[in-house]
Image (cartoon, grey):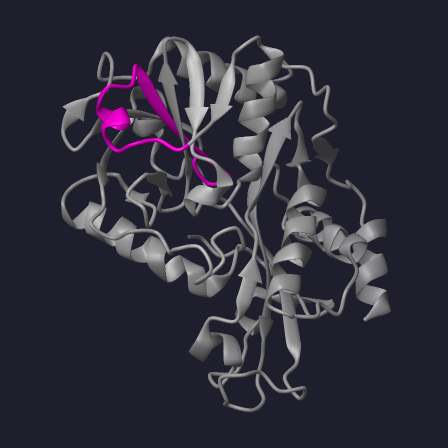
Amino acid sequence: MQATQTIWHNGKYKPWAEATTHVMAHALHYGSSVFEGIRVYEKEGRPVGFRVREHMQRLFDSARVYRITIPYTLDELVDACHGVVSRNDLNSAYLRPIAYRGYGSIGLAPKDDLPVDVAVAAIEWGAYLGEEAREKGARVCVSSWQRVAPNTIPAGVKAGGTYLSSQLISMEAHRLGYDEGLGLSADGTLSEGAGENLFLVKNGVLITPPQASSILAGITRDTVIRLAHAMGFEVREQALSREALYTADELFLTGTAAEVTPVASVDDLDIGCGSRGPVTQRIQDAFFGLFSGDTEDHFGWLEPIAADRAATDRVASAS
């Protein structure tokens, strides 16, 4: 990860190296943070944010579950997203908004004296699983680590502590020589990747595990479902057995970081032709076509990033 110049932190734009927090921050010890990942794409020479407001709304929804009160409005944080892109002169970017319990009492249950710190950073980040995987397909394995069971840690919330599970899955996969790992839910059915949702293609039908299978119902997942419906595909959300992986015609992963990435093999068994399949290619083309202009943005997902600093200065002056 290459540092950019400026981060929005607690209402102010700061140099990258000065956006710091105390080592005794509650979030560092107990994982009490919620965060998002947002892509900004270059379209016709200008940056456009992809479903920025939906991501920010999910940040607030995640915070509500953990009773984290974010001391800024949704509009202020959207303005901050615009600001870190324009002030860092980026045409494409990966944004990381985060809200976390800061420095105060050390007890596990947060006290009223704990501040909630908020930051939005922007970095340049390419294909999460690599350009080759995006074109030819990733090699994945089923992890020995299962996803969290319902009513333990809420899998549908994008919180820092939840991603310890994802780290175990991904580290195991890398140690074994794979690009990524897939987790099973507590009942042994398919859940999702370490940081991605999963889609199977069987007989031309797209099938994806439901939210009850301990998944984060991703915004890119929703994007693919809606694009697929618009293209005439049938999409089913249903529980899936592990063996469904090995007999699928095609597999692909979705996520803000992963975007739409085909799966070439699972546990060293080729899926379909052992490369990107035709349905996955059509889904990829439709998704990336949103940013090239080949796919019409009928849903209003793209938000041009403010070229001037009016929006960003409004946030800074209010702090």
Q: Residue at x 44, y 19 (%)?
A: 206
**Residue 239: where, in percent of width, then height?**
39, 33
Tell whether position 63 is magenta. Answer: no
Quarter of image, res 65? bottom right
**Residue 281: where, in percent of width, then height?**
42, 14
Position of the C terminus, as image quadrant, is bottom right
Q: Nearer the viewer, residue 37 or 182?
A: 182
Q: Nearer the viewer, residue 45 or 314?
A: 314
Q: Is residue 65 above or below residue 45?
A: below
**Left or right position of 87 against 142:** right
**Residue 167: where, in percent of width, then height?**
32, 56
Give the extent of the magenta segment. 239-258
Q: Is residue 19 above or below residue 270?
A: below
Quarter of image, res 300? top right
**Residue 213: where, in percent of width, then height?**
42, 43
Quarter of image, res 258? top left
Q: Residue at x 47, y 12 (%)?
A: 282
Q: Is residue 154 above or below residue 238?
A: below
* Outermost residue toward the front in this view: 187
Tell whether position 256 is magenta. Answer: yes
Q: Residue at x 27, y 57 (%)?
A: 168
